[in-house]
Amino acid sequence: MNREPVTSLKGIGEKTGGLFRRLGVETVEDLIHNYPRAYDAYEPALPIGQAKEGKVCTICGQLVKEAALRQFKNMQIVVTAVKDLTGSMQLAWYNMPYLRTTLQMGKILVFRGRVVRKGNRLAMEQPEVFTPESYGEISGSLRPVYGQTKGLGNKAIAKAVAQALKSREVETEYLPERLRKKYRLVEYPCAIEKIHFPANQEEMLGARKRLVFDEFLFFLLAVGLWKEKRQDWKSRYPMGPVRELECFQKNLPYDLTGAQKNVLAEVQEDLASGAVMNRLIQGDVGSGKTVIAVMALLQTAFHGYQGAMMAPTEVLAKQHFQSIQELFASQGIEKRVVLVTGSMTAREKRLVYEQIARHEADIIIGTHALIQEKVVYDKLALVITDEQHRFGVGQREALGQKGARPHVLVMSATPIPRTLAIILYGDLDISVVDQMPAGRTPIKNCVVDTGYRDRAYRFIEKEVAAGGQAYVICPMVEESEMMDAENVLDYTKQLRKKLPPGIRVEYLHGKMKGREKNQVMEQFASGEIQVLVSTTVVEVGVNVPNATVMMIENAERFGLAQLHQLRGRVGRGERQSYCIMVDSSGEEDTRKRLDILNRSNDGFYIASEDLKLRGPGDIFGQRQSGDLAFQLADIFTDADLLKAVSEEARRLREEDPLLEKEGHRALKQKLEEYLGLSYEKLSL
Ligand code: ADP
Ligand code: MG
């Protein structure tokens, strides 16, 4: 293992090192494990007339304009245009003024990038530039595409990776020969090299299979250890039923569904059992998981203990906080609820931490700030994580260690079939909320092309006039987060012009400060803002029942499960809701895929249908399972392998619980690295 910093590589100084750090890469080892996010097949150039909006294309033509430099806000934009016999295309680059020397009028060059629409013309933003000769050399090969950050482009990353691979000591194989043979896995050193630089698709898939196998194996061995470790933990906080909770339930503005009642009963049984609860509540978006969590927290508070709930985003944490406060106020419940988020000032944080430490807070809601070391709890008996797939197992552990083995409740809307859930959450008991609250009007869906936009805006206008609200999810540009924000801003500006002045349109994106985000979200929730233009930051968990329209631009770029999550933001109240998916691809396949959402509102079904439509070449496209603990593996695409590995992990632990046998030593060492702990310590 090479734990030297990346700056030990040639040509990487402090500055570039800092940029790598932003990608989560500190050491040479990290760099080697920073796998490509996708691969580009460098295809032959297309006639410009055949370039399609929304697609990455390669074109070759003559520059017909002197490259010009424009200033837009704090950005310098180089613009020019290229032409061939079939058409012309605008070209633009952000903050790369030096390109002007390459882009001389009359030159014939090759450009490769995503085609976008600018007004009524097609354009490419940030295309790669090649001479026809240099493109000829790479044409037909696969190139890695890495996650990038401003100032650190793909070429530079690939170059650093190549150097890192060269400088590394050859690692030995650690998987038992038996497993490698049985599953036809390539050797580890080879897999690492080929995952970055495969000669072709076959090599790439072979390398990927090996690495996915390892990811599953280590994860499942770890889950097995955790399960064993906490199997018989006695709880210091056994909690029997409390009368106040029955009152609370009776006074809710609705009756719990049968499924909610069942799950609540399971949770309460766990809490009273004397053992430490470790339970996952799975339920589709809108199935009403929050109220179950709130009741568990309330029960904890009535027993005189503290309970905490973590959400993956500040927006969601804040929303939970507010709705719990309102709920308690309306029922005259005097338990104290506090909020802890990363965007609070140091002073605010200190005050809340004091309240928590002195047990002046009964229920603590927050983001991952809750697991920061400074928070000291008093009798922390219950920890809930909402939408847990966004939290790593390690984080769960860290929070768990804050108390004397608190009860753990994990809530997730990720549509995972039960067979897989049992494997992945092997250390948790599983409850399913498999019923929707009554009285929901099913969402009406449509998939439309970009020509429908104006009608969609008129429709939003009408809905707002009738008292509703709308989300518009903006085209996301993956290439750079900076452009993501620009898109949302531009779109908002345009939309304001298209809607009457009485309608307030605001925006939300991931680069905004926590405080700003909260403010916008609050104003949207209270109805002061009627139309919210947003990136996918609203995807998870947010609840504004008055919103009736979800319009999704560039729907073709999302995975179906993600679209389903987005759609789940509407249809939460009694009014009829609508989901308008704008498909900019104009392709038959995309239409077919999006049509699945038209037909079904069932998250499990949607995810499995999506899988059927995707071939092995799409594995690096949309990952359905969010960011479980895996870098490469996708639990849907790799479901069969996951099942097989689960079987192997079980067998390994049965045969050789401490991995002491001769053939398992190397594996044990690797697993310890993965766990960051000694295997023996964990398995005791
Ligand atoms: P999710 O399971 O996606 O977290 P929420 O807990 O946010 O869903 O619930 C969605 C909405 O449904 C909320 O407005 C909530 O108040 C409401 N709700 C929850 N349970 C019921 C029920 N039994 N009957 C009617 N509405 C309910
Ligand atoms: Mg929720």
Image: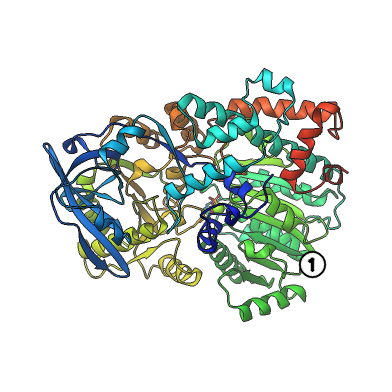
Q: Position of residue 305 (x, y in %)?
A: 78, 65
Indicate left or right for 311 with 144 as reference: right
Going 85% across and 53% down the picture, which residue do you hit?
A: 235
Q: Position of residue 184 (x, y in %)?
A: 63, 20
200 above or below 252? above
Indicate left or right for 131 with 410 as reference: left
Graded by Cα atoms within 10 Å as few (under 14), some (14 to 19) or many (20 or more), the crowding at tag 1 reads some
**Residue placed furthest toward the top:** 182
Please tell me how many numbered marks the rendered image carries: 1
Q: Quadrant of the N terminus?
A: top right
399 above or below 633? below
Residue at which label 1 appears: 304
Q: Position of residue 543 (x, y in %)?
A: 48, 57
Q: Nearer the viewer, residue 80 or 66?
A: 66
Label 1 beta carbon within 8 A of ligand 1 = no
**Residue placed furthest toward the front:** 10
Q: Secondary structure at mark 1?
A: loop
656 above or below 30? above
Q: Amino acid at mark 1?
A: Gly
Going 67% across and 36% down the picture, which residue do you hit?
A: 170
Q: Nearer the viewer, residue 137 or 304?
A: 137
Residue 210 in sight here = yes
Which quadrant holds residue 143? top left
Q: Nearer the viewer, residue 136 or 440?
A: 136
Going 61% across and 43% down the picture, which residue do you hit?
A: 167
Q: Quadrant of the C terminus?
A: top right
Residue 418 in sight here = no
Q: Position of residue 242 (x, y in %)?
A: 77, 59
Going 86% across and 57% down the picture, which residue do you hit?
A: 236
Q: Nearer the viewer, residue 271 or 400?
A: 400
